[in-house]
Amino acid sequence: MLLFPIDMIDTIINFTNSNGDIKIDNVKQKKLKKRQWKHIDRTKILYFIGMLITMGIVKKPSLRDYWETISLTYTPGFTD
């Protein structure tokens, strides 16, 4: 991996999953509506980082525009 070492990616994954578990436990303790949390893996985090990099290169007026499906403003890779 050129941009981030794999051990750094794994650290991000571990902290993200731990934080998600803590947030869900807090919701359960407060007896609020249960939310679904699915642990992320290396593939998902690398896809997310790739999207962030692409969003830095391909400028759109708003975040919603990256997921637009109209052919005039469609951005390949975001809605796929």
Image (cartoon, rainbow, N blue to C red):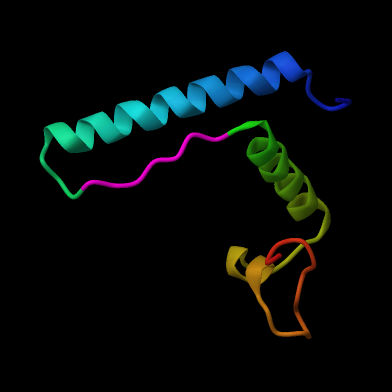
Residue at 32 percent across and 26 percent down: it is: 22
- Relative to residue 8, is residue 27 drawn left or right? left
How far from the left and from the top, in percent, is residue 11? 60, 17
Front residue of this view, candidates 41 and 57: 41
Residue at 78 percent across and 23 percent down: it is: 4
- Relative to 5, does residue 45 appear above or below in the rendering? below
Query: Does 76 appear in magenta?
Result: no
Residue at 75 percent across and 19 percent down: it is: 6
Query: Does 39 appear in magenta?
Result: yes
Report the span colored magenta. Answer: 34-40
For the stretch drawn in magenta, what is the main secondary structure?
A: loop
- Relative to 40, does residue 57 appear above or below in the rendering? below
How far from the left and from the top, in percent, is residue 10? 64, 20
In the rendered image, which quarter is residue 5 located in?
A: top right
How far from the left and from the top, in percent, is residue 21? 35, 28
How far from the left and from the top, in percent, is residue 29? 13, 31
